[in-house]
Structure formats: C-alpha cells, structure tokens
Amino acid sequence: MNDSIASSAASAIPADRLTQAIGIVQRMREEIRSAVIGQQAVVDQVLACCLAGGHVLIEGVPGLGKTLLVKALAKTFSGDFSRIQFTPDLMPADVMGHAVYDMKTQSFSVRKGPVFSHLLLADEINRAPAKTQSSLLEVMQERQVTIEGESHQLPPPFMVLATQNPLENEGTYPLPEAQLDRFLIKVRIDYPSVEEEEQMLRMVTRDRVGDGLDVNQVATLVKPETIVVLQQLVAKIRVDDAVSAYAVRLVRATRDWPGIAIGAGPRGSIALVRMARAMALTCGRDYVTPDDIKSAALPVLRHRIAVSPESELDGLSSDDLLLGLIEEIAAPRG
C-alpha cells in the first residue's frame, strides 16, 4: 500500500501501547510455533482470529495437528480451556449444562457445562447432530448461555475452535449455514512439507513414550484480561475508506461471480475488515492495507459461499473461485 493511504489511516493507539501489543503478539506466535511444526499461515490466521474476537473452524484430515494447535494457543494465556469430543449421541445439555434439583435445599441449581470457559475446543464438530450443533449458536453470537430460562454470561474472552474431518461422510452431519456463518474464519490445514515432516518426526519420537500431544514447552505469557485489551486495540486499528470499499467490492462480487451459486452476505464484509485489522497487528502495523484484505479473503469467505454444481463437476473449489475473483477485483491505489 502506498504512503497516501497509509498516512490517512494513522492510528489513534498510543505508540508505546502499540509497541507493547505487537511484542506480546509476536511472542505468542513464537510459542505456538514451538509446538506446531510448519503451518505458519494457519498459526497466524488462528492467532489473528483470537485477536479479532472471532471463532474458527479448522478443517483437515486426521493427524495434521489441529488439536495440537488449539492446545498450544490455550497454553499461551492462563485462561480456562475445555475440550468436547462431539459424537452422534452428544446432547445440548452435555455442552451447555443443565439444572439439577437438590433434595436437601429443595431447589434447582445450575450445573455448568464445558462451554463455560475461555477457549472451547469442539473436536470433530460435524459428528454431532444439528440439534447439538445449534446449541452453540447463542453462545457464539451472544457470549451467553440460557439454561431453564435464565441467562448466564460468559467471561471474556470466549472463543470456539472447532475441528472437522472433510473426508468422512459416514456418521457426520454437515454444519448448517447459520452455524457456519458464526465462524469468523475457516482454516484448512494441508500436509506438511518433507522437511517439516522430518522435523516433526524427530521432535515427537525423541525421548517420548506414546503419541500424546505435548505442549509443555509452550510458555504461558498473558492473562485473559490481556487478550481482552489486545482485542480492544485491534478494534481501534484504522481502516481507510478506500480499503473498506475494497472489502465491500470483494464480497459483493461473490454474489454474481461465475461458478458461485450463493455469495456472501453483509456479514462477510464485516468479518473481512475485522480479520484484516487483526492481521495488520500480527504484521506489526497500526493500519490495514489492501494486502491485509486479500490475505483475509480466503479464510473469511470460503465457508460463506456455495459452489455451483457445474463448477464442482469441473473440479473447482471455493478457493479456486475466490482466488480468481481476488485477482480480477482491483485493489485501491493512490
């Protein structure tokens, strides 16, 4: 981005606070990467999603480190971490909690479920039926849980990190559109390179018994209150009007782009700017560039569009169509 847009996006964040925030984010990224070999873009996207106050859906075949990534992120700050293994027989009360009648006091008390945490790992979320999946809708949107008509607020920060296997269809239930739209981004984890896989093999097999996920080397750096402050700083990162208009053009283009049956709604534009702000901070900047919008476009939009049957027959994925769209839509200059 050239100097005219950068200067017009001067941040109101004090320089000392910005420098301190950038330092914390860089240290968090380094700690996560100490446990997760490779997948640098995925680490950056998940960390940026946390800073943007969003939820992330992580997709990849088994054994690529999805759960390890989530556990490493949780270890970087001293918040509460819960893990739920989603199964076909999982009920909403198993996630949210339920009311229990106490015979001694002759009154009901609330037994809170694992959702009452700062980081919730919903492992293999697509293995639970829609009824259980939809139980997360309220808490993901409102950060509260309603049990027996009584609302319970969750302490910030709160983030859902859900994983799913894209290959298996048997025993799985596709996430409904309303559920998908609650995720700020959808991240795809691919196979590691040869060098990364060799490094991973050496690290996992050296002086270890079994194949448990080890995040002991990840240092705890901050408290939950610090994450909230970082999220507030991200919200203050300036976005030039031309950059905002560029984000809107990208999202609107998905609605009539060849090969896309259903385009992204207005929430896509909002998510694009939120994610771009967080990515700007992870890059050490206090303003959003068009490149930040481009970098955020795939993880933000890939789960918000539907590929037409004709494109599927041609072997085109949502990423293929979005990459072509990003190349065609002109970014702001000057």
Image: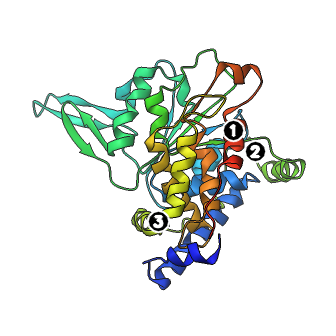
Q: Quadrant of residue 32?
A: bottom right
Q: Secondary structure at mark 1?
A: helix
Of residue 315 and residue 57, the one placed in the foreground of this image is: 315
The residue to which callout 3 is attached is 234
| Residue drawn at point x = 47 percent, y = 36 percent | 181
> Which residue type does callout 2 highlight?
Val
Q: Is residue 203 above or below residue 65?
A: below
The residue to which callout 2 is attached is 209
| Residue drawn at point x = 66 percent, y = 34 percent | 318
24 relative position to 216: left or right: left
* Distance (Cα) linking label 3 and label 1: 27 Å
Q: Secondary structure at mark 3?
A: helix
Q: Is residue 36 above or below residue 303?
A: below
Quadrant placement of the N terminus: bottom right
> Which residue type does callout 1 highlight?
Asp
Find residue 164 and report its horizontal and vertical position in percent.
Answer: 60, 32
Q: Residue furthest bottom?
A: 16
Q: From the image, state whether disc 2 or disc 3 is nearer to you.
A: 3
Q: Is tag 2's residue or tag 3's residue first in the polypeptide sequence?
A: 2
Of residue 298 and residue 90, the one placed in the foreground of this image is: 298
* Distance (Cα) linking label 2 and label 3: 42 Å
> Which residue type does callout 3 highlight?
Val
